[in-house]
Amino acid sequence: MNRPLLVLVGGFLGAGKTTLIIAAARLLQSRGVCVGVIANDQGGELVDSRWLAELGLDVEEVTGGCFCCRFSDFYHSAERLLVRRPEVIFAEPVGSCADLSATILQPVKSFYKDQLQPAPLTVLVDPLRAQEFLGAGADPNMAYLFHKQLAEADQVWFTKADLCGSPPGLPGVTTRSMSARTGRGIAEWLNQVLSGNEAAGTRLLDINYEEYAQAEAALGWLNWQADLRLRQPLTPAAVAGPLLEELDGRLTEMSAAIAHLKIFARSDTGFIKASLCRNSEKPLVEGDLAASPARRYELILNLRARACPELLQSLVNEVTRHLPGRLIVNHQESFRPAPPKPEHRFTSVG
């Protein structure tokens, strides 16, 4: 291939974007295909970037804003990957982002068509989240983002088919189902997005950027990173699990709805990622579950919830203060996303 395929995988927070990219990358690597990944977040210190790197994937990241607002950074990340000659580059935009066709795919097709070949825009949907956003009591800001993401997708796939029964119907949207954990649908999805038989970025949104900014700002964001020196050795799961459980419980008590909560814990003996997408759900724990106890840890925490950022920061400070050891916080930021100001926004499909 003269140009690597650029595969954007969108979808709301917790839809399973990173999990799909890992499963797809491993399948492609088993076929001898070279793969790169670009991660994205409104802040720094990303759980997913560290997780992907620890799993051996070639990762670049764009932080401090979404791909559309940092399009130049996005392309420079792709350029750094191009040096390693990947055949496929997966890019995972921020889970609250929309208007990806107009602000990313169309500019790539116009300015960098000799360097990158865009694949159809895939939007992933968590079936339980869809039921929530389609219901009468749905948060209007979150539902707005959800429906805008669907409206511009070239392909829509329900995820977590191993955990959910029949997914809800999405009016006017053709959907398929997959499970990154069992492998169901992964090869089919890859065949479709990599075949070159479907156009990329075929739809442009009718979107009001004031409403869009208001919807994104409805969530508080917190990114946190620290070094922990325990008084007694613990396994990675024994460090991250209780921390996740305590934060979940406290957020639930505060009626702060969790959009995504992720913790990465790494020691010399192993690493794990623990995450959940809504209050009181069973967490997903991945990684070296049999790792030996250790005393030195790096911890990264990413939290998105319907609460003011100052409250999230205060809560995390309080909960982590009780970890059984000496904690050195190296990075902490809590904020609401700034209004999106894309570098480019096309009004026609190229």
Image: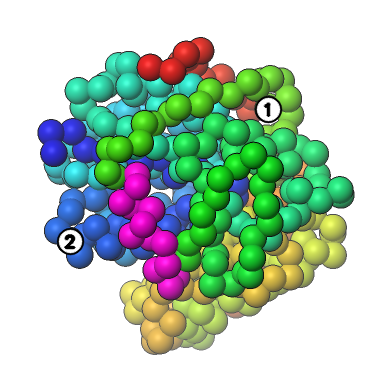
Which mark identifies residue 31? 2
Q: Mark 1 points at which residue?
A: 212
Magenta highlight on residue 190 = yes
Residue drawn at (68%, 43%) of the image: 171
Q: Which label sits in the foreground, 1 or 2?
A: 2
Residue drawn at (42%, 58%) of the image: 20
Taking depth in this image into account, of 323 and 2 the one nearest to the observer is: 2
- The answer to whether 198 appears left or right of 265 in the picture is left
Is residue 15 visible from the viewing direction of this image? no
Magenta highlight on residue 108 = no
Kindly report the distance in space between the C-alpha atoms of the residues bearing marks 1 and 2. Answer: 40 Å
Looking at the image, is 283 positioned above or below residue 185?
A: below
Neighbourhood count class around disc 2 (C-alpha, 10 Å): few under 14, some 14–19, many 20 upward: few
Query: CB of mark 1 within 8 Å of CB of mark 2?
Result: no
- The answer to whether 249 appears left or right of 169 in the picture is right
Tell me which amino acid carries mark 2.
Arg
Looking at the image, is 107 positioned above or below residue 167?
A: above
**Residue 226 position within the rendered picture, expressed as x and y whole percent measured from the top left:** 51, 59
